[in-house]
Image (cartoon, grey):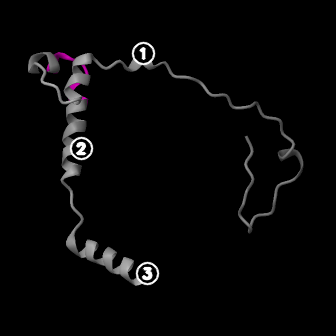
């Protein structure tokens, strides 16, 4: 697939390069069945009470527990006061 070069410092291509015929790109579907998440993981992610032994026996527990820990950590993040002040000052100057 050829794309136009929009750089004004580069001369446009002509000749054989622009006349090449290329096959169209087609979309392919990826089967979702390959990424099955057990029902107990869904229940746990929804906040329902689940049995810890069953939860840990489910195959995807480790990755989802890491995702949950990272999400909780990011939820508690706060912008440092000097940066927050600089942002508010820039907004005030533009307003």
Which of label 2 and label 3 is nearer to you?
Answer: 3
From mark 1 to mark 3, how far is it between C-alphas? 51 Å
Drawn side of residue 93 relative to residue 65, left or right: right
Decide whether the magenta segment is chiefly helix, strand or loop. Answer: helix
Read off the magenta span.
56-63
Nearer the N terminus, badge 2 or badge 3? Answer: 2
Find residue 50 and report its image quarter. Answer: top left
Find out whether the residues at labels 1 and 3 contact each other: C-beta distance under 8 Å: no
**Element type at mark 2:** helix
Residue at image location 73% in from the left, 48% down from the top: 3
Distance of mark 2 from mark 3, alpha carbons? 33 Å
Residue pointed to by mark 3:
94
The residue pinned by badge 2 equals 71
Relative to residue 89, is residue 22 drawn left or right? right
Q: Is residue 84 above or below residue 40?
A: below
Q: Which mark is residue 33?
A: 1
- Give the SS element for disc 3: helix
Q: What residue do we see at 21% from left, 18% from top?
A: 40
**Which residue is at 87% across, 42% downward?**
19
Q: Residue furthest bottom?
A: 93
Between 92 and 1, the residue placed more toward the observer is: 92
């Amino acid at each position: 697939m050829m794309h136009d070069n929009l750089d004004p410092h580069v001369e446009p291509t002509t000749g054989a390069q622009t006349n090449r015929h290329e096959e169209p790109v087609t979309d392919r579907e990826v089967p979702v069945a390959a990424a099955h998440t057990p029902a107990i993981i869904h229940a746990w992610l929804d906040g329902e009470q689940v049995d810890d032994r069953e939860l840990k026996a489910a195959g995807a527990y480790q990755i989802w527990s890491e995702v949950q820990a990272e999400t909780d950590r990011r939820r508690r993040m706060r912008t440092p006061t000097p940066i927050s002040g600089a942002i508010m000052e820039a907004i005030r100057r533009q307003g």
